[in-house]
Image (spheres, rainbow, N blue to C red):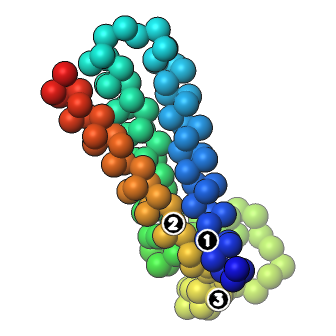
Amino acid sequence: MNEKIVSLIKKYVGAFAVMGGGTAVVLILREHSAQLDKAQKYLNLADAFTIPSVVMLMLGVLVWISTTGSFDALGYAFNRAKEAFIPTIYKHEQFYDYKVRKDKKRKKGYGFMFISGGIYVIPAIIFNILYACA
């Protein structure tokens, strides 16, 4: 198989493993196995799938925003403030130079977080519908 495909599969498996772990933690904290009421079980399952999926979706959005360079001005401002309090021997860098340097180092390919979070929210919606019908 192609190296890119294997890398992509590993990313998705890792994301789903993390979300599965989050689901297990929520179910354990909610004492899901002790619940006897079917509606309460559906509610626990809906919450257990919703929380990790929304966290992964929001992490994906945050990483996507950061890869577009939206936080570059904030990073530059913090670096300038740090230089004001802790002088260094390095030459001052203009914002344009800072932006060009950051653009070269920026990595893409974090869309799997957003996509896997979107897929993982589907069981949450199903369990919410089952809870509403129970």
| Distance CA(mark 2)–CA(mark 1) | 8 Å
Front of the two marks 3 and 2: 2
Residue at the (63%, 55%) spot, across then down: 14
Residue at the (76%, 64%) spot, across then down: 86
Q: Is residue 76 left or right of residue 30?
A: right
Residue at the (53%, 44%) spot, across then down: 19
Front of the two marks 2 and 1: 1
Residue type at tag 2? Phe
Badge 3 element: helix
x, y percentage for residue 39?
27, 18
- The quarter of the displayed image where residue 115 is located: bottom left
Q: Is residue 42 above or below residue 22?
A: above
Q: Foreground: 101 or 19? A: 19
Disc 3 or 1, which lies upstream in sequence? 1
Q: Foreground: 7 or 69? A: 7
Q: Foreground: 2 or 18? A: 2
Residue on which the image places disc 1: 8
Q: Is residue 72 visible?
A: no
Front of the two marks 3 and 1: 1
Disc 2 or 1, which lies upstream in sequence? 1
Query: Quadrant location of the C terminus?
Result: top left
